[in-house]
Image (cartoon, rainbow, N blue to C red):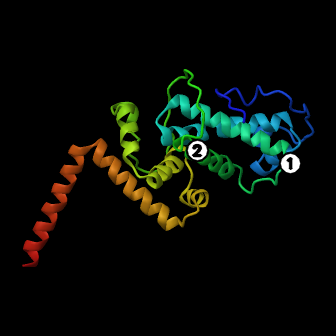
Amino acid sequence: MLYCSGRYAYTQMTHLPQTTTHEKGNPLTWPDEELVRQAQRFDQRALATIHQRYFDPVYNYALYRTSDPSLADDIASEVFVRFLEAMRAQKTAPRSLRAWLLGTASHIVADYYRGEYRHETIQVDDIQHWPTPEEESPFATIESGIQREALYEALDRLTEAQREVVALRFGAALSVKETARVMGKTTGAVKLLQFRALANLRKWLWPDHTRQDEGQEKAGQSRGTTRDE
């Protein structure tokens, strides 16, 4: 098995046929289906575009799952190595490129936690951005106060399924439907896992606010009971 580190490993791999057969303009505008078709022919523009489009989401997913920037970089690189191996083996094209890449990342993370993945420690820059869906999340203020170490510790306390949902929804910025497809769960199950995960993270990252909210809720319930009486 080939293990590569660094976000440039994918584009620097050798022994690939140097072909460019597509004539439909800028590959950055191609849909995923077209990129995969051309990647199966080892079109270098298509391969480079896939890497450019999806490295960061895969890396952020791995970071949310492992809390280790160096390991996340290594895992993301390995995902694209396996994609190249799948193209070389002429396997059936994935129905969803993003789901295939993130599903592969999930398997590598699982291997890591089982001790079957060999990680080579390298120095990389820490993550600079935390892409999130357009909804309220406990990660919105990470850069303005909460230390990343605190977030990593909180993520480590989640259940495996909760952390997987957080990684897919906020690390890879998948929709609920896409997350359900990757995890093999219903959208309702994903929503429930996300609700519980975010509730736990808010409780652990902002305990004072959580206690204040609970106090206000109890006070409101008490007033409601008094009025009912």
Quadrant occupied by the C terminus: bottom left
The image shows residue 204 at horizontal and vertical percentages of: 29, 45
Quadrant occupied by the N terminus: top right
The image shows residue 82 at horizontal and vertical percentages of: 73, 41
**Residue 80's quadrant in the figure?**
top right
16 and 130: which is toward the camera = 16
The image shows residue 6 at horizontal and vertical percentages of: 64, 26
Crowd band around label 1 with a 10 angstrom C-alpha radius: few (<14), some (14–19), many (20+): few
Crowd band around label 2 with a 10 angstrom C-alpha radius: few (<14), some (14–19), many (20+): few
Residue 133 visible? The answer is: no
* Residue drawn at (36%, 38%) of the image: 153
The image shows residue 28 at horizontal and vertical percentages of: 76, 38
* Residue drawn at (33%, 31%) of the image: 145
Mark with earlier residue (1, 2): 1
Q: Secondary structure at mark 2?
A: helix
The residue tagged 2 is 111
Q: CA distance from mark 1 to mark 2?
A: 24 Å
